[in-house]
Image (tube, rainbow, N blue to C red):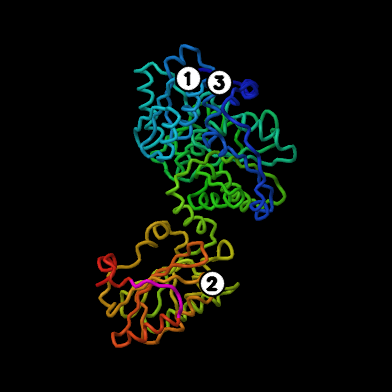
């Protein structure tokens, strides 16, 4: 930046910003369920409901609306992980100019398609925003285009600052803090510039992923720090180097920085869905995750916080991962590796112990087991919990009762990979029958299954994962002597659970059968 603007300059720019030709004044809605849980009032600024499902079109249009006719004739270019790209593409379409968008190759397809649908010319380059930025600068010089920076530009910053102007106009009562996601820093710079000029007592808290915290590291170091790598789960905030002007403003105006992890963000996405029935992208949930963390750390009650839901460009395919990690992120689910004797009845005794845990019974959310040793069985178990911090106590309780347990609730490898890899062929699984059951999702369904089994039938494989429905899908391997096939069929008929025999399934023969 050639010249630093003064606070009064930014206030004037925000008040006169041209954003409403394309943007809407998004709603500021109470998150009623989350507010009750946290004993604080949480307000959601619904930037996920903008025409391009992100706040980014505010800054992009404000910048482009002030270009000269000659600049518009030549066209514009930008580098973006997706949301700014869609903002530039929409602004260019509205202003009748060409838009070249350089995006990292890691950009979700949803955002690429969104840019193309708005008439933008997409160029994919590099693994992060910083890589795409360098390529865009070269194209800009070669083709004589005007560069529209996603964050490090006073007009872009001012456009984003109109969000704060709306928040303070929409909420007249006490407001203790506004939580803002940070990538390159344009949003937090604009929001902080307006709030500190108009309501300086309101705290502005910047939020970053723990693996993409370039702004927090830069502020701590008192100089801009370039990260070697950035995590890509929250692709909208995956920035290796923050802007010069955004660094200056954030260092001067942001009261505090909070770092959140992947599990916390997944849990926050679910919290937003519960209150709004809308799904935000990871970057859009950062602020909510930070509010929950802030309340837990500071033990606040009765305060009012605003969270900016800054984007909702979520690939549908990512929802499976988000749903799976949300319960662990909230610590509503705990994961364990449990070792038990490989003997008749040990599985049933373990299930009975789950029902007798201190504080009340827990539901089993997952159970993975494959026979592999003659003396000991290793099982992967997921359980619901009543609150944070319970997993260590549950593991200790299992161990006291003779079931050695390892708490995996905070083990990244176990959560992301191991839970899907338990199993394999076993030479011990003779006379094995493989069946796929549908159990009613209610207490006692598994115990009914175990109680009806003959004592000499051995469970050699078991896989169950709660699907959030009123029924559960279970894969069971049972060692049934050939002479007892008729008795086994009678057991299945008496049990009454729908099932499919999978013993001849070719995938079973390839991966699980010895």
Among numbered discs 3 and 2, the one appearing first in the sequence? 3
User: Residue under circle 2?
Assistant: 442
The residue nearer to you, when weighing 263 against 225, is: 263
- The residue that label 1 is drawn on is 96
Number of numbered discs overlaid on the protein picture: 3
Residue 496 lies in the magenta-colored region: yes
Q: Is residue 422 above or below residue 316?
A: below
In-front residue for pair 171/243: 171
Other-residue count near label 2 (Cα within 10 Å), few / some / many at <14 / 14–19 / ≥20: few
Q: Name which of mark 1 and mark 2 comes first in the sequence.
A: 1
Judged left or right of residue 156, residue 372 is left
Please name the residue shown 53% across and 60% down the image.
331
Q: Residues within 10 Å of mark 1 (few under 14, many from 20)?
A: few
Residue 231 point in image, percent of width and height: 42, 44
Quarter of the picture holding the C terminus = bottom left
Distance of label 1 from label 3 (alpha carbons): 31 Å
Residue 4: image tag: 3
In depth, the one of 164 and 31 nearer the eye is 31
Say which element carries label 2.
loop
Specify start and end residues of the magenta stretch as a single range. 495-501
The reply to whether the C-beta atoms of the residues labelled 1 and 3 are less than 8 Å apart is no
Question: Which percent across, then down, holds residue 127?
Answer: 36, 37
Distance from disc 3 to disc 2, alpha carbons, whole Å, reads 63 Å
């Amino acid at each position: 930046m050639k010249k630093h603007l003064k606070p009064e300059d930014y206030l004037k720019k925000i008040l006169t910003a041209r954003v409403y030709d394309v943007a809407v004044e998004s709603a500021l809605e109470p998150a009623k369920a989350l507010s009750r849980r946290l004993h604080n009032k949480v307000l959601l600024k619904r930037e996920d409901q903008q025409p391009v499902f992100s706040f980014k079109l505010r800054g992009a249009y404000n910048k482009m609306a002030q270009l000269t006719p000659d600049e518009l004739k030549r066209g514009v270019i930008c580098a973006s992980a997706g949301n700014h790209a869609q903002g530039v593409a929409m602004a260019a379409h509205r202003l009748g100019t060409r838009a070249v968008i350089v995006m990292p190759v890691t950009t979700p397809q949803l955002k690429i398609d969104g840019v193309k649908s708005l008439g933008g010319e997409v160029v994919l380059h590099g693994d992060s925003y910083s890589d795409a930025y360098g390529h865009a600068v070269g194209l800009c010089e070669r083709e004589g285009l005007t560069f529209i920076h996603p964050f490090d530009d006073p007009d872009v910053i001012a456009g984003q600052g109109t969000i704060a102007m709306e928040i303070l106009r929409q909420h007249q009562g006490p407001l203790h803090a506004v939580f803002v996601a940070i990538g390159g820093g344009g949003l937090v710079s604009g929001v902080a510039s307006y709030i500190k000029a108009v309501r300086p007592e309101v705290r502005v808290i910047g939020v970053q992923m723990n693996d993409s915290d370039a702004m927090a590291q830069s502020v701590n170091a008192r100089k801009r720090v370039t990260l070697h790598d950035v995590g890509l789960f929250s692709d909208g905030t995956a920035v290796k180097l923050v802007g010069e002007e955004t660094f200056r403003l954030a260092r001067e105006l942001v009261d505090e920085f909070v770092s959140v992890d992947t599990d916390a963000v997944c849990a926050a996405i679910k919290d937003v869905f519960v209150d709004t029935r809308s799904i935000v992208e990871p970057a859009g949930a950062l602020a909510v995750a930070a509010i929950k963390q802030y309340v837990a750390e500071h033990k606040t009650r009765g305060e009012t916080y605003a969270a900016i839901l800054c984007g909702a460009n979520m690939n549908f395919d990512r929802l499976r991962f988000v749903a799976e990690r949300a319960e662990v992120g909230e610590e509503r689910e705990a994961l364990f590796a449990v070792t038990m004797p490989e003997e008749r009845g040990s599985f049933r005794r373990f299930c009975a112990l789950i029902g007798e845990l201190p504080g009340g019974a827990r539901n089993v959310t997952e159970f993975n087991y494959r026979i592999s040793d003659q003396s000991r069985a290793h099982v992967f178990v997921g359980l619901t919990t009543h609150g944070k911090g319970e997993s260590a106590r549950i593991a200790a309780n299992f161990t006291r009762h003779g079931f050695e347990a390892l708490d995996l609730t905070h083990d990244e490898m176990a959560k992301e990979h191991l839970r899907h890899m338990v199993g394999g062929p076993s030479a011990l699984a003779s006379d094995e029958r493989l069946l796929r059951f549908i159990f009613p999702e209610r207490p006692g369904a598994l115990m009914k299954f175990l109680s009806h089994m003959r004592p000499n039938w051995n469970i050699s494989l078991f896989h169950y994962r709660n699907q959030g429905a009123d029924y559960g899908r279970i894969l069971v391997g049972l060692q049934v002597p050939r002479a007892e096939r008729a008795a086994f069929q009678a057991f299945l008929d008496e049990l009454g659970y729908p099932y499919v025999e999978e013993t001849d399934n070719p995938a079973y023969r390839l991966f699980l059968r010895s």
